[in-house]
Amino acid sequence: AAGRLDAMSSAFLSPGALALASARPRRASPRGASTSAPCASSPRGLPPLRVFAMAGQKDGRGGPRNRTGRTHDPYSTPLRDANRDRLYGMLTARAAMTLLTYLTEINKAGATFFQEYMANNPIPYAFWASGKVKDVSGETFIEGLLAMSPTNIEEKYRDNYITVDPPALAVRLLDIRLALRDEWIADLAHVREENADIMKVSCMTSLENSFCLDCD
């Protein structure tokens, strides 16, 4: 390969440029190393292939994003991480409660199954609760539904059963969680106005109280 490259260089370069290139000193190779020997772990002398985890993921297989990957902020603090994890957990819990309300109206057997699952797998998103990141954020709750197989639930007073598909419930839960996210963003857009209203009411109340004291 080196001889072929030298032949191509001599064919396309001028005599002066070729002489200058040949006179340029070459970097010395480490002792005991051969410059022409290919890499043992890769073909055609290429550097060995190394697989790194993608930024914001727990592994290189496209797994769930970790704390820093959700915000893409390298300066995220532990307090911000905790607030975000508990916010995700509250979002998942409220989505589960919404799904339970829907199931109570249209699917009694599915509602019974999902209510028992919620009772056996609570999401510890409250500030006084503790748990792993996946537990607090609700990922364990959703992954548990996705890992379950269809379950047959017998109906009372009937010689029949109803099949409940937990992975399908998990997909509906994710859709509801996304819809609630949009509603929360729209509602939280008025926080600045609400803060101004609270300060306005507080200042007016203090002013009225001061006038009453002066009058007394």
Image: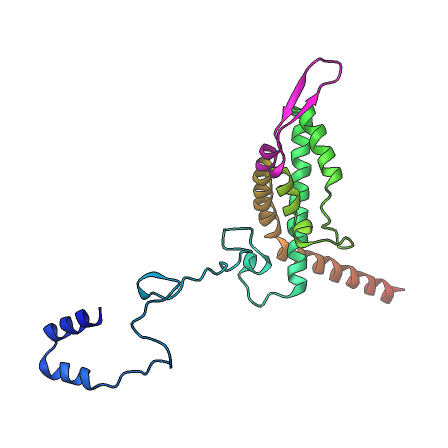
**Residue 16 position in % (x across, y down):** 11, 84
Query: On the rendered image, what quadrant is the C terminus found in?
Result: bottom right
**Residue 181 position in % (x across, y down):** 59, 46
Q: How many marks?
A: 0
Q: Is residue 98 above or below residue 61?
A: above
Q: Is residue 213 above or below residue 87?
A: below
Q: Residue at x 64, y 60 (%)?
A: 81
- Whether the magenta-drawn stretch holds residue 195 is answered as no
- Whether the magenta-drawn stretch holds residue 163 is answered as yes
Q: Residue at x 71, y 46 (%)?
A: 123
The colour style of the image is rainbow
Query: On the rendered image, what quadrant is the N terminus found in?
Result: bottom left
**Residue 195 position in % (x across, y down):** 67, 58
**Residue 107 position in % (x across, y down):** 66, 24
Task: Tell me where residue 163 sits by quadrant.
Answer: top right
Q: Is residue 89 above or below residue 78?
A: above
In the picture as drawn, the residue positioned furthest to the front comes out as 32
Numbered range of the magenta stretch: 147-171
Q: Is residue 147 above or below residue 205?
A: above
In the displayed structure, does residue 72 sit left or right of residue 142?
Answer: left
Q: Residue at x 68, y 56 (%)?
A: 197
Q: Pick whichever, 88 or 139, lies toward us.
A: 139
In the picture as drawn, the residue positioned furthest to the right comes out as 216
In the displayed structure, does residue 112 sit left or right of residue 9?
Answer: right
